[in-house]
Image (cartoon, rainbow, N blue to C red):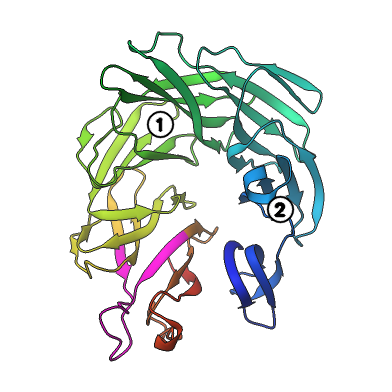
Amino acid sequence: MTLVGDVHGPVDLGSGVSFVSHGRFLAKFDPDGHPLWARAPTVLPARVAADAQGSLWTTTTPEVSGVPHSIAKLGPDGEELWSKSLPGEVSALSPTGDGGVVLITLFSGSITYGGASFSAKGDTLGSDVLVLALDASGAVAWSTTIAAPLAPPPPPRGYMFLSAPDVAAMPSGGALVQAVVTRLGGEPLEATYERLVQRLGPSGEVLWARTLPAQRHSPAIRLVAAPDDGALMVADAGIGGSTDLGCHIHPGPGLLLQALDASGQPRWERSIYGVVGSTLPSFDAAGNLVLVGVAKGWIDLGGGNLDGNAAAWRIFVARYAPDGAHLASRTYEGTPPPDAGWLFRGESRAQGSAVDPSGNVLLTGFYSGALDFGTGALPDVPILEGPYTTRGLIVKLAP
């Protein structure tokens, strides 16, 4: 398991692995949760992803690191194998099963990478989307560009912007890609958001494409590749907005899950209502969906109401069958130490999750106060350290 975190001051990961850092760090743990190594890079990575071979892919941006855009690959021991400059900032990256990676970035005009040239062709105020697949050595395996639709923006004062929120490598090759066209126009000036989701084949060819209904609210939508080359879209409706992925309108707040088959057609859709958020979902070896996240107050993940503190976050874990049926769910809630006072509520948050080959759920996050996952309470965060001081956590849960 690989952990990416932010820290200010000394860190003790256990088993003698400790360091002092003021920024982002990388660490790796064995299957039993023992730390193997930790690094505090001098150039802070903006995005990090681990592949099936245990290597790490990292990208940097000038805003984060003060150096040009770049991508690097680290071996299983954390040592850099190679690094290359990039023509633009990477908005998302996803490792492939053969040691490569697929990334997505915006560009305008003409750019080059690895001897290949790319020319923008869109009709937006900003940039085109570049989808770039790299092999294990960083060479271009395939590429494609996505331009904004050429339909005119709404008058008067019409503008169009293209963004590239997400990409997910597919098990059989190729990738899922999400692009968003923002149209501004009218009096008063209003915005509408149109999302394009494409499935690209092993050479970058378009296998299917779906345009989601245009909306005035732009929820965060993440893409997950399913083991059978299907897909999952996870939309965070937030507070005060609604979400429509093409089947029904989810009024929000909450999460909307939609599973697609290999041809891009909806299989099932599920709404989760409440003040909730999720990490990137995972699939186990049987094709079951594992959803990890946080919630305040009541939440129904499909197995009935799970009530909790309405003022503090708690962790939830849920598992769904390939047809979307609820299999299991539970929450883990932090509690304040005795006589802590109203400021020190005690809460727990999950920020990352994964599923190992045996179906165990791995999650990372942090907590304040006291927290127990059923094997004994984790160390309390002392009140004297302040109500907003937290401890990091790494947890492995049985299927």
Q: Residue 352 at x, y = what percent?
A: 49, 58
Number of the label disc, if any, that sits on residue 16: none
Query: Which residues are drawn in magenta?
Result: 329-351
**Which amino acid type corresponds to the residue marked 2 in the rendered image?**
Ser
- In three-dimensional space, the C-alpha distance between marks 1 and 2, rounded to whole angstroms, equals 30 Å
The C terminus: image quadrant: bottom left
Q: Which residue is mark 1?
A: 261
Label 1: few (<14), some (14–19) or many (≥20) C-alpha neighbours in 10 Å: some
Q: Is residue 265 left or right of residue 14?
A: left
Q: Which tag, 1 or 2, sits closer to the chain's start?
A: 2
Q: Residue at x 21, y 32 (%)?
A: 248
- State whether residue 52 appears in this view: no
Side (left or right) of 133 relative to 256: right
Image quadrant containing the N terminus: bottom right
In the displayed structure image, the side of residue 393 where residue 204 appears, left or right:
right
Query: Compared with residue 217, is residue 1 higher up or lower down, i.e. above or below?
Result: below
Give coordinates of residue 44: x percent, y percent.
68, 55
As drawn, the label of residue 55 is 2
Residue reaching furthest to the bottom: 338
Helix, strand or loop at disc 2? Answer: loop
Whether residue 267 is visible = yes
The picture quadrant where one finds residue 231 is top left
Q: Does 332 lie within the magenta span?
A: yes
